[in-house]
Amino acid sequence: MTCPVCEGSFSRVGRRQFCSDACRAAAYRRRRNMGPPALVLPKSRPRRPVTVYECDLCGERSLGEQYCEQCRTFMRRVGFGGSCPSCGDPIAVTDILEEEVSP
């Protein structure tokens, strides 16, 4: 078998992957000092501020607020959305696309 550090050949005994303890330590130092991973994932954002809720009793819609102040009940989630650019009322993406949208 070939050692991945020094590329020398050795006979494998058990689960050994390196020819010596020095090569094993060098491989560990190399892995440790590689730095941050190349792929950096973006931070997750809370979903509530972009979620549209609708009250079942009065039909009032709200963006990011789950509690209906008029009826004093919790509203159901309609889906992701935002404020309508023309009227300013909360509108869900599913209302526009007529499809279910997942994050």
Image: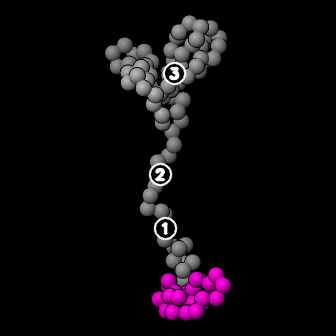
Please say if 45 is above or below 38. Answer: above
Q: Residues within 10 Å of mark 1 (few under 14, many from 20)?
A: few
- The picture quadrant where one finds residue 39 is bottom left
Q: Which residue sits at x=63%, y=17%?
A: 74
Q: Nearer the viewer, residue 33 or 22?
A: 22
- What amino acid type should be assigned to the residue bearing mark 3? Val
Q: Which mark is residue 35?
A: 1
How many numbered marks are there? 3
Secondary structure category for the residue under label 1? loop
Q: Residue 96, image x and y in percent?
A: 38, 21
Q: Residues within 10 Å of mark 3 (few under 14, many from 20)?
A: some
Whether residue 45 is visible to the viewer of this picture, yes or no, is yes
Q: Tell me which segment is drawn in magenta.
A: 1-23
Please say if 60 is above or below 28. Answer: above
- Position of 36 with respect to 24 (left or right) is left
- What amino acid type should be assigned to the residue bearing mark 2? Leu
Q: Which mark is residue 78?
A: 3
Q: Which residue sits at x=51%, y=43%?
A: 44
Q: Residue 63, image x and y in percent?
A: 50, 21
- The picture quadrant where one finds residue 55 is top right
Q: Residue 28, image x and y in percent?
A: 57, 78
Please say if 56 is above or below 9. Answer: above
Q: Nearer the viewer, residue 22 or 56?
A: 56
Q: Which residue is mark 2?
A: 41
State the predominant SS element of the stretch in magenta: loop
Tell me whether the residue at label 1 lies in contact with that at label 2, contact meaning CB atoms closer than 8 angstroms. Answer: no
- Position of 37 with respect to 21 (left or right) is left
